[in-house]
């Protein structure tokens, strides 16, 4: 076995990086911390991807460590200038590996398709309604079905009731924005030419940030709104009276 | 000499044609800007009884009071139009006015002013006065200029129009974030850093070259007119080092801005410029030219050619590239560089939202880059396909040459798409051609064309680096590359897939769901050929005799280590459902810096590998190991914390402390400073070893390709005696 200090350092370093990445992705042990119906689906998918990814990563690094244990002190191939390159290896092995990778990808694709269908097709009920959201430099405008209409520029939050699916129809009044509720795992691109549809089923009351995720100009960073998830009665009184409690 | 010969060949008729064409194109550029001032009075309001007749006269003076120094988005301002001069007041009427503004909205404050078709004018009762008050609401964006055209009419009130006289005046008002003309805001510390670092880079490199070579007029003339592929390769190398240093300096600025929450080191506008130019310079003007530097130097040597197929085209390509890069970066000194992200998403690039010259200059720079790249592409294709020495067929070509072949084929396919897109963008900005107008969904249209170019561009950047790794690994483990044919086929398959999966950059823009699922599978399939290439590269170590004390191998192994993380985290992004959350976040930033960072480290390995061939001397090992460990550790410290910021939007210039992103950003900034210091060590090593390094000899590493059969550096025509295949 031929393994010097530097190589060992490099490979164990790489494995260390993989483990560090794991903790980084899971917010240093604090978990993913999502809320709402989308987050349940999304966080499962994320964990599946990350589990498979880490397993494959550690597998590949271990394979590499094993390869290094086979090193010898003899030159196996004749290495001369202008030597005619020979093709080492076996096409059957290559096909087998290609099939194995494809198999893993199919598992992931299947899970992906289930999730995206859930994200894209609103599961509405009788209480559901649609809020039209329009992005502007650098605020959001909300338009409720009863004609209620205001913007986020004066700090007013977007209000929705808890446990009711609400549909968002998102577009833009000027440039390309992206309407996102990171903690609910929802992101809908706001294009000036077309409305995109998404939905939310909030399961906990509280206030959450709304952020723009597409560079939209000098104050992109300040394009922050708020989502306020309210109890149904509270929402109803605000919605009918236009007064927030 | 060649240059002069070239000019003599142009006879008078051709000179006339060229001059004529130049005049026409100059005229075409300038005429639209000299938009005619309105001298007459047209428009619906004049149907309402206003009698702005009489003659235009200098006697009538128009003023507009109440204009702020600069306007703020969404604010309301009360403006006062007043006219003096012209005929004496008297009779029943004394004056009238008309005012329009190109942006914002005008509204009436009292019954003396009415609004018609967006223009303000007096009413019947407003006819008796010579000052009027109008309210102007500023538009939602204040990064632009507003212009007001005011016409005033002095009336003598005798009921006839003949003695009345009127005048017209134009007022310009800047938004508080609008920029214009040549200006450097030295109040902002970041500006000093930008200007200082650019200047010091240029001075440092000039001094280095001056010290290392006897540099006089003859040498200058030689470097400006050379057509030798080795000289041009060196020029590409220096140009790429300069652009890398600029890109690197910008990245440090970005990191310094984000080091603490609510930092005010840079403004949003300047930060966006830094982000945009960091991306554009690094991808298009630093990593790619570095690949071309080695491709120029090494490929003809590897295939036993005396030079490139078209040496003068080669020189043209280089100088156009330099001009392109400088044009794009010059925006910093002309009112602000492009600040829309290197992806140039429409409609932010529209003249309405980014009125400065930055985006236009970047567009011009890109056009020059594309001309350069197209020339190089043709050159490399013909060189590789037609100029190999007899006895070397395609399958025997060295792997680096194979990778360059796939790179240039990809470039030939994708850059025309960018060319079209940029020309349409420039058309939109200067001639209102409306290619990307939102009404015809120009936003989506831009995304499609740009990413048809943009996605394969990533592979264009990656393949030369992989090629270097495929040369370095067999040389230092003393075994031939494992699965050579599998690798070549995988490269071909990866190239084809890469031009078919652009839509994964637009997963949540509302394109067809079935199409997105196809693109998800397609993108995931990219990992099959690259997985095979990766495993083949590793399998080369099987029963081998690796020498880990050599720096090129260390760099390539470091790159292999971090490429795996970049690759695996990339699979997450290929999923349309995962992309909903990860799109536009720091997770994405971490992913592509892991892949491109690994390419950069592979390229460093290539530099350590071929430096002895190019300069005839070895790089210093002690400094080299410092460079390696600091780079490897620094890159990981910089980007690992960013994987955890998968709820933080990218390209934001400030974040609140309550968001809880401060720790990761701080660690990341420390990492980037480590990488920066490592590159300074490298630069010192690079320039110092040109004179003081150990003499290398023809083949210091025991390489097996033809460049190692000739002297270091190679003679003018590459080989004293042409090498032969065994």
Image: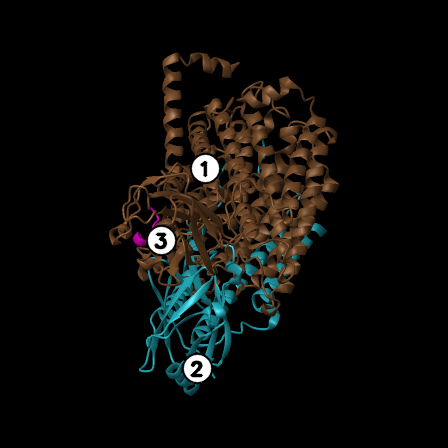
Chain colours: A cyan, B brown
Picture residue at 42% right of the left edge, 78% below the top: A160
Chain of the residue where label 2 is placed in the rendered structure: A
Does B61 sit above or below residue A154?
A: above
Q: Can you tell which of label 1 and label 3 is closer to the viewer?
A: 1
The answer to which image quadrant residue A108 occupies is bottom left
Residue located at (59% from left, 26% from top): B709
Residue drawn at 60 percent across, 59 percent down: B640
Characterize the local packing of mark 3: few (<14), some (14-19) or many (20 or more) Cα atoms within 10 angstroms: many
Looking at the image, residue A109 sits to the left or right of residue B223; the answer is left
| Chain of the residue under the numbered disc 3 shown in the image | B
Judging depth in this view, the residue of B293 and B177 nearest the camera is B177
User: Counting other residues with Cα less than 10 Å from the Cα at mark 2, is it few (<14), some (14-19), or many (20 or more)?
Assistant: few
Residue of label 3: B444
Q: Nearer the viewer, residue A37 or B569?
A: A37
Judge whether residue B437 is colored magenta: yes
Circle 2 SS class: loop
Q: Secondary structure at mark 1?
A: helix
Q: Position of residue B704 (x, y in %)?
A: 58, 32
Earlier sequence position, callout 1 versus callout 3 = 1
Q: Would you say residue A163 sits in the magenta stretch?
A: no
The residues colored magenta run B435-442
- Badge 2 and badge 3 both on one subunit: no
**What's the mark number on residue A243?**
2
In the image, is B140 to the left or to the right of B614?
Answer: left
Label placed on residue B364: 1
Residue B297, percent from left and from top: 55, 29
């Amino acid at each position: 076995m031929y393994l010097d200090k530097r190589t060992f350092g490099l490979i164990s370093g790489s494995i260390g990086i993989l483990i560090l990445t794991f903790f980084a992705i899971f917010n240093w042990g604090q978990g993913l911390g999502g809320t709402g119906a989308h987050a349940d689906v999304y966080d499962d998918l994320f964990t599946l991807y990350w589990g498979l990814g880490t397993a494959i990563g550690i597998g590949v690094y271990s394979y590499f460590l094993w390869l290094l244990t086979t090193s010898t002190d003899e030159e196996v191939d004749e290495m001369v200038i202008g030597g005619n390159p020979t093709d080492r290896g076996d096409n059957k092995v290559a096909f087998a590996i290609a099939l194995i990778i494809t198999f893993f990808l199919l598992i992931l694709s299947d899970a992906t398709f289930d999730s995206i269908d859930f994200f894209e097709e609103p599961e509405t009920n009788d209480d559901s309604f649609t809020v039209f959201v329009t992005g502007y430099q650098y605020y959001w405008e909300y338009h409720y079905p009863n004609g209620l209409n205001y913007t986020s520029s004066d700090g007013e939050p977007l209000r929705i009731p808890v446990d009711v699916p609400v549909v968002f129809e998102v577009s833009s009044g000027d440039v390309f924005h992206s309407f996102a509720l990171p903690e609910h795992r929802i992101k809908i691109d706001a294009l000036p030419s077309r409305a995109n549809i998404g939905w939310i089923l909030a399961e906990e009351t509280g206030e959450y940030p709304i952020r723009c995720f597409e560079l939209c100009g000098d104050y992109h960073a300040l394009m922050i709104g708020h989502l306020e998830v309210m109890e149904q009665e509270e929402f109803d009184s605000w919605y009918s009276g236009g007064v927030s409690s | 000499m060649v240059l002069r010969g070239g000019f003599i060949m142009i006879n008078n008729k051709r000179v006339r044609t060229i001059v004529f064409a130049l005049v026409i194109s100059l005229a075409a550029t300038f005429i639209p800007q000299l938009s005619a001032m309105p001298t007459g009075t047209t428009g619906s309001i004049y149907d309402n009884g206003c009698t702005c007749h009489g003659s235009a006269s200098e006697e009538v003076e128009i003023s507009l009071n109440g204009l702020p120094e600069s306007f703020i988005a969404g604010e309301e301002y009360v403006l006062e139009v007043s006219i003096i001069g012209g005929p004496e007041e008297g009779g029943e009427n004394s004056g009238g006015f008309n005012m329009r503004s190109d942006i914002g909205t005008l509204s009436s404050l009292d019954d003396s002013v009415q609004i018609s078709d967006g223009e303000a004018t007096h009413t019947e009762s407003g006819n008796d006065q010579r000052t009027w008050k109008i309210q102007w609401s500023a538009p939602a964006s204040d990064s632009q200029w507003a212009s007001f055209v005011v016409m005033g009419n002095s009336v003598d009130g005798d009921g006839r129009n003949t003695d009345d006289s009127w005048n017209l005046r134009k007022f310009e008002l800047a938004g508080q974030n609008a920029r214009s003309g040549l200006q450097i805001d030295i109040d902002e510390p970041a500006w000093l850093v930008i200007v200082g670092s650019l200047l010091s880079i240029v001075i440092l490199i000039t001094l280095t070259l001056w010290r290392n070579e006897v540099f006089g007029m003859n040498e200058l003339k030689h470097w400006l007119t050379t057509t030798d592929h080795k000289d041009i390769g060196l020029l590409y190398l220096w140009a790429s080092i300069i652009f890398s240093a600029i890109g690197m300096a910008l990245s440090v600025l970005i990191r310094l801005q984000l080091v603490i929450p609510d930092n005010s080191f840079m403004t949003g506008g300047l930060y966006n410029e830094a982000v945009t130019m960091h991306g554009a310079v690094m991808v298009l003007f630093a990593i790619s030219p570095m690949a071309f530097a080695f491709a120029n130097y090494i490929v003809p040597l590897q295939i036993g050619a005396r030079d490139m197929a078209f040496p003068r085209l080669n020189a043209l390509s280089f100088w156009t590239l330099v001009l392109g890069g400088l044009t794009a970066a010059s925006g910093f000194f002309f009112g602000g560089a492009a600040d829309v992200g290197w992806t140039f998403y429409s409609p932010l690039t529209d003249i309405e939202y980014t009125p400065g010259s930055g985006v236009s200059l970047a567009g011009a720079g890109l056009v020059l880059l594309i001309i350069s790249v197209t020339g190089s592409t043709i050159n490399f294709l013909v060189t590789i396909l037609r100029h190999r020495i007899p006895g070397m067929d395609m399958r025997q070509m060295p792997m680096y040459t194979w990778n360059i072949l796939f790179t240039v084929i990809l470039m030939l396919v994708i850059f025309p798409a960018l060319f079209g897109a940029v020309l349409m963008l420039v058309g939109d900005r200067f001639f209102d051609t409306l290619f990307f107008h939102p009404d015809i969904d120009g936003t989506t249209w831009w995304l499609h064309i740009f990413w048809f170019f943009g996605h394969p561009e990533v592979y264009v950047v990656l393949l030369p680096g992989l090629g270097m790794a495929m040369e370095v690994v067999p040389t230092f483990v003393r075994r031939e590359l494992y699965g050579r044919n599998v690798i070549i086929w995988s490269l071909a398959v990866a190239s084809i897939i890469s031009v078919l999966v652009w839509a994964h950059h637009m997963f949540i823009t509302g394109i067809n769901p079935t199409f997105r699922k196809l693109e998800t599978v397609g993108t995931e399939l990219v990992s099959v050929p690259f997985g095979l290439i990766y495993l083949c590269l590793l399998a080369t170590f099987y029963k081998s005799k690796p020498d880990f004390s050599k720096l090129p191998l260390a760099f390539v192994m470091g790159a292999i280590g971090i490429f795996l993380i970049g690759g695996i985290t990339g699979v997450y992004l290929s999923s349309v459902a995962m992309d909903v959350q990860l799109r536009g976040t720091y997770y994405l930033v971490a992913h592509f810096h892991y892949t491109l960072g690994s390419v950069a480290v592979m390229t460093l390995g290539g530099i350590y590998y071929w430096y002895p061939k190019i300069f005839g001397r070895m790089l210093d090992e002690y400094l080299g190991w410092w460079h390696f460990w600091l780079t490897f550790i620094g890159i990981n410290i910089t980007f690992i914390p960013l994987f955890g910021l998968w709820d933080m939007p990218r390209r934001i210039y400030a974040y609140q402390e309550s968001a809880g992103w401060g720790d990761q950003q701080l660690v990341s900034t420390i990492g980037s400073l480590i990488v920066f210091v490592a590159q300074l060590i490298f630069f010192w090593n690079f320039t110092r070893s040109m004179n003081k390094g150990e003499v290398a000899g023809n083949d210091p590493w025991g390489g097996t390709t033809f460049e190692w059969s000739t002297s270091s550096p190679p003679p003018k025509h590459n080989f004293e005696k042409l090498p032969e295949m065994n």
